[in-house]
Amino acid sequence: MPRKNSMLVSGQPLTPAVFHILLALADGDKHGYGIMKDVENQTAGRLKLGPGTLYGTIKRLLAAGLIVEIDERPDPELDNERRRYYRLTALGRKLAKEENQRLMQAVKSARLKRLSDDPLN
Amino acid sequence: MNTNPWIELSLHFYRQLLRLYPQVYRATYEMEMLRVFKNQCQEAYQQHGSFGLFLLWSRTLVDLSVTVIYEHLSDPRATVGLLDVMPNTQLPWKGVLLVLIPGLIFFVSQVVQVTSTRDWFFLILYRAGYFLILPVLFVWLITRRFPVWGLIPFGLLYATVWNYIDRFNLGALPFIGYRVVYARVLFGIRISVSDTKYLLAVFACVLLLAVLIRHNARRGQISRSAWKWLGLYGLLVVLQIMGEAYRRAIAYRFLLELSQESPAGSVLLNDNFFGSLGNFYDALPFLLLIFIGMLFARKYKGFSFLVLLGYLLPTVIYGRYGTWYEFVPFYVVGVAVVLYRFVVALVAPIWLVRTASVPSRQRAAAIPIAVAILCHVSLSILVYLGGLNQEGLPATLLDFAAYIWEQLIIAVGLGLALALYLPREKGHVVASATLMPTTTNF
């Protein structure tokens, strides 16, 4: 039953897991655990991905061409295990930017409606 | 690295749990997931000790439960055999499980019930019947295709819902005050309109049936042979109602005499003539289900017979080993029940989906049910010889005939189903002789 994941196309909102994984790879290639820690840091520990969610999402991102697996090791000295590293593709970056725009727009709307706790607002 | 025994134990268990993922997924990500989990364990232990590991496990188990199911359903290879069956090939274990789990539950519950004389069977019938459809609906939701293996739980759900309507008198809700309306008609029998509980359900059933028959007839889906089976079915039901009315009239007269001697007998007088119309309540839903099976027959053809097997699954074959059956040796009832459950719930579905040709599929549908019904007929004979009927009154030949007649109606229904589901295969029409009657109480 191979069917295209309708959540991973341009114009559609991304799930938190997908968005934060793309975000984690935006500043460089990472392996699974590196992505997991980055997501945890991004969200101040609010989003903790389990291995199942992490690799399930990675599998779908690979299939959708949003990330690719790379052979090279960013720092072989620090990585003595044969981990898989992932890199954001141009398409993945485009989708992450779109999602970022969407979220910024949502925040802007929230501010206009005085839903933001931002004291500057 | 870390040789903490708790971490080692956690890794060992997690490695075993990873086997739950699909094979292809595991081949790609198993080592990676294990490494990540190892890192998580080390970090959790460093920060919070054993309690940290406990927290990690609580998160991980939820994550694993959800993602295992998702990966199985989203993996292309995982659904092979789950949505469609491939005769003469290796049995797809996921599809087999989907159909065998309801069968196994009923099989075990029946054995427990018979051996303990408790009501486990009925508890399962009225409670679990609803939930067994859930895995099927879940597959349907994810894949957007109804799995052929889900036809048995579908039939089971249908039977359960229908029994619920009867049990909780749901059909009577619109008839306020029905308990106070009485009349006297044939044979001086007291008629209670309490049996209106059947009316709404029967009315809805007839309406749906008419729509389905008309729809299929317009599409040319009902063969000449199927019309004959349908006519025969209707005739048998009408005769059954007439016969039941006559049987009840005799029973009434007997009870009337009994009531003069025993006050308890008068209570039984409420078992009235209208009750004979209750036969509609059994015969109509089975007929309706046969035509509902037509909705699946366009895609699955003879496999639609699985719906009927699911419907027959919860039928009662001396499910309650009551006091009036105690003269039948216990082991006879036990063996009959086990055999019946084994055949209807486990053997017949597997046989049906393993066969490829139309004749062998017809055999696969007819023969196991014929074997199963032999159990019921044998027990009916024993009960008759034992001398009491279901009401605990002296059994007559009429009581015995009523049992057999009921089985005959189901047999004709099965003939109709095969004529509808496998209509265009000339030279392979199932003879009525091969379709033995099936279970009791529909």
Image (cartoon, grey):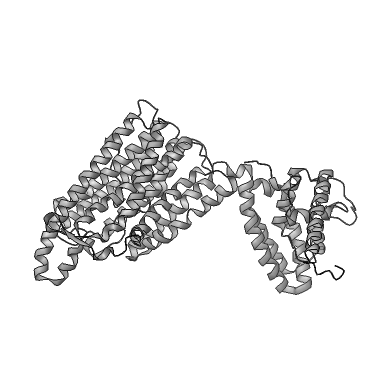
Q: How many marks?
A: 0
Q: Does any portion of residue B315 appear in the rendered image?
A: no
Kindly identify the residue that appears in the image at 72 percent across and 57 percent down: A51
Viewer-proximal residue among B162 and B28: B162
Give the residue drawn at x 73%, y 55%: A54
* Apparent side of residue B418 relative to residue B22 in the rendered image (left or right): left
Q: Position of residue B16 (x, y in %)?
A: 64, 57
x then y, percent, for residue A15: 72, 54
Tell me if residue B427 can be seen: yes
Q: Nearer the viewer, residue B353 or B19?
A: B353
Q: Is residue A70 above or below residue A115?
A: above
The image shows residue B372 at horizontal and vertical percentages of 32, 47
Q: Quadrant of the N terminus of chain B?
A: bottom right
**Left or right position of B333 against B61:** left
Seen at 90% across and 53% down, the residue is A75
Which residue extends farthest top? B426
Give coordinates of residue B281: x percent, y percent.
30, 51
Task: Please state if B413 lies on the left or on the right of A77 as rendered.
Answer: left
**Residue appearing at x 87%, y 46% in the figure:** A72
Q: Nearer the viewer, residue B325 or B266?
A: B266
**Apparent side of residue B174 relative to residue A58 in the rendered image (left or right):** left
Q: Nearer the viewer, residue B297 or B212?
A: B212
Residue B129 placement: quadrant: bottom left
Q: Quadrant of residue B266?
A: bottom left
